[in-house]
Image: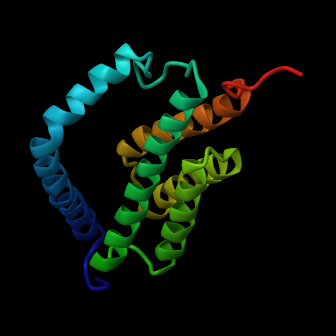
Amino acid sequence: MESLSDGAKFLLVIIAVPVGFGLLILPLALVLKKFGPALHRAAEVDMEDGGLPSLWSKPRSREQAQRACKQAAWLLFLFAGLFAFQVALGAAQASALFDALILVACGFGLRRCSRVAAVLALVLYTATAVISVSALGFFNPLALLYIAGLSYGVFVAFAFHRLPAPSPSGSAAG
């Protein structure tokens, strides 16, 4: 790629990123087509049980916050996969695999509603986005969506620890 001009590199990235993203989305679309109706029914039941009605709403229970933390963790796993995919294509340096491993570790921490993991993931991804803008010279608008999702992960991780723990049922006050 050293022999390519800057314009050719830019054009290659503009073409390769949507194609690669499409290749990643196709299996997801097939899974959603197969399991979509069941997921939709589960979401309706969740709403009836006082589930999380929208992305940015405040969780009303620890269970809701824990569920939202797990969803944010899946976002981290997706980012880690995208970083590894970029390395496999040669579009990123091998050091991006280290970032991917940190994101996976943060994802496992966020599944346990860790505030440290949520903040670390947000800081790491934001720093990666800023560095890539300075290195490539253009901004990926999807980065704002990713940062918003990670910000929500931080929000629900902190909300989980603020909400009261459920009282043990059946315990007698003595």
For the point 71% across and 33% down, the residue is 161
Q: Quadrant of the C terminus?
A: top right
Q: What is the number of callouts on the image?
A: 0
Residue 80 lies left or right of residue 150; in this view the side is: left
Toward the right, the furthest residue is 174
Q: Position of residue 63 (x, y in %)?
A: 54, 30
Q: In front here: 129 or 158?
A: 158
Q: Position of residue 1 (x, y in %)?
A: 28, 83
Q: Position of residue 135 (x, y in %)?
A: 48, 64
Q: Position of residue 44 (x, y in %)?
A: 28, 20
For the point 42% across and 62% down, the residue is 136
How is the rendered protein coloured? rainbow
Residue 137 lies left or right of residue 172; in this view the side is: left
Q: In front here: 149 or 140?
A: 149
Residue 97 lies left or right of residue 161; in this view the side is: left
Rendering quarter of residue 82 = bottom left
Work out whether 83 lies above or below 157: below
Q: In front here: 174 or 135?
A: 174
For the point 84% across and 20% down, the residue is 173
Residue 94 lies left or right of residue 48; in this view the side is: right
For the point 53% across and 34% down, the residue is 152
